[in-house]
Amino acid sequence: MKIIKKIPVKQVLTKDSKQELAKQFQKRHQRYEREIQQLRFEQRKLEKKSDISQSEIDKRFTHEINLRKEQINWVEYKLQQLDILPEGSELFIEEVEAIVDVHEGAVWNEIYEDQTIVIKDGIVIQAR
């Protein structure tokens, strides 16, 4: 039997990787800002044309805008952490899924123990 297991991927911070991550975070920040502007535009457009009640429109769009604002706050937090962390630190960047073979008699703790992939400047340096 095979199961899917999530494995964290961490990146060792170097000068180059910090700059690249900062660029990625800034792009995400800008994207969320654009999405908020687009949502507000769509909201105004619906308010003028729609038969839907004003409160229902506000409720829908406020929820979506708040989700984007939370994402912006998260990106800003990540940018702050990036500035604080020294080079050589490991930073969680994503989680990937791996297929694991499970068979009768296997020790569950060994199958499901914590595993991590560590990359440095785009190269896998450890799979532990």
Image (spheres, rainbow, N blue to C red):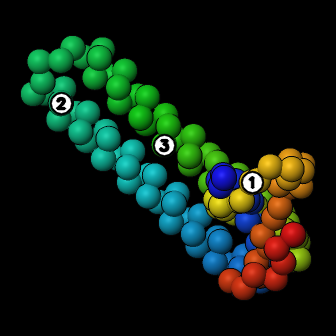
Disc with the residue nearer the chain's start (3 vs 2): 2
* Above or below, comparing residue 24 to residue 52 in the picture: below
- Measured as percent of width and height from the top left, residue 87 is found at 86, 77
Q: Which residue is mark 1?
A: 102
SS for tag 3? Answer: helix
Q: Residues within 10 Å of mark 2 (few under 14, many from 20)?
A: some
Q: Which residue lies at the image location 50% right of the left edge and 66% below the top edge? A: 27
Q: Is residue 103 left or right of residue 98?
A: right
Amino acid carrying mark 1 in the image: Val
Any mark on residue 94, and which?
Answer: none
Name the mark nearer the viewer: 1 or 2: 1
Along the line of sight, which residue is nearer the eye, 123 or 57? 123
Q: Is residue 67 left or right of residue 103?
A: left
CA separation, marks 1 and 3? Answer: 40 Å
Q: Residues within 10 Å of mark 3 (few under 14, many from 20)?
A: many
- Quarter holding the C terminus is bottom right
Along the line of sight, which residue is nearer the eye, 11 or 74? 11
Disc with the residue nearer the chain's start (1 vs 2): 2
Q: Which residue is mark 2?
A: 46
SS for tag 2? Answer: helix
Q: Which residue lies at the image location 18% right of the left edge and 18% below the top edge? A: 52
Q: Which residue lies at the image location 52% right of the left edge and 41% below the top edge? A: 69
Any mark on residue 68, and which?
Answer: 3
Q: Which residue lies at the image location 65% right of the left edge and 61% below the top edge? A: 99
SS for tag 1? Answer: loop
CA separation, marks 3 and 2? Answer: 20 Å
Along the line of sight, which residue is nearer the eye, 51 or 9? 9
* Above or below, comparing residue 58 to residue 55 in the picture: below
Q: Is residue 96 visible?
A: yes
- Measured as percent of width and height from the top left, residue 77 is found at 70, 52
